[in-house]
């Protein structure tokens, strides 16, 4: 599956899982994220103070029983970005970096 195929038409769990498995960062309109979100087990929800919380989720992996990791962030109002992560530790590190950046923004 190419990236264009993954993004053509309405997003499905299968299309999103395949794109994430390829290492793609996938932006989705909020209604499309909400339509597939049940397939992504939420592990944690981190408030940002800037908008929607950052979600740490387990993601389905095509052809594998073991689940992968991803974070879901608000890129702009009405949109979520799903980012595949190599591990829980890598995801938590990125979430910490995001929170530090948001804190710096508040500090001016």
Image (spheres, grey):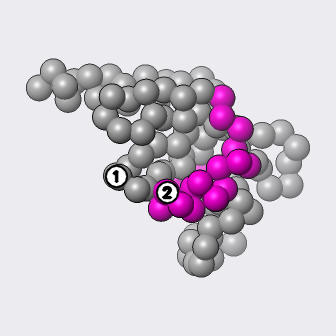
Q: Is residue 32 above or below residue 105?
A: below
Q: Is residue 25 left or right of residue 1?
A: left
Mark linked to residue 1: none
Which is closer to the viewer, label 2 or label 1?
2
Task: Give the answer, above or below, for where 6 lies relative to 33.
Answer: below
Q: Is 6 left or right of 63, judged from the image as shown?
A: left
Give above or below for 88 relative to 86: above
Which residue matches tag 2?
A: 30
Q: Residues within 10 Å of mark 1 (few under 14, many from 20)?
A: few
Between 31 and 55, the one nearer to me in the picture: 31
Q: Is residue 94 magenta?
A: no
Q: Residue at x 35, y 52 (%)?
A: 77
Q: Which mark is residue 76?
A: 1
Observer-nearest residue: 1 or 32? Answer: 32
**Residue 47 occupies which quadrant of the picture?**
top left
On the image, the x and y values in percent for residue 54 come to 48, 35
Quadrant housing the N terminus: bottom right
| Vertical order, 48 against 19 (above or below) | above
Kind of element beneath mark 2: helix
């Amino acid at each position: 599956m190419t990236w264009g195929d993954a993004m053509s038409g309405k997003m499905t769990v299968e299309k999103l899982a395949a794109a994430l498995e390829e290492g793609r960062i996938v932006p989705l309109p909020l209604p499309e994220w909400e339509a597939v979100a049940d397939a992504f087990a939420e592990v944690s929800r981190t408030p940002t103070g800037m908008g929607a919380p950052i979600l740490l989720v387990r993601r389905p992996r095509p052809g594998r029983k073991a689940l992968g990791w991803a974070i879901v962030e608000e890129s702009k109002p009405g949109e979520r970005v799903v980012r595949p992560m190599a591990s829980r530790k890598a995801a938590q590190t990125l979430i910490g970096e995001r929170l530090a950046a948001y804190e710096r923004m508040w500090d001016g």
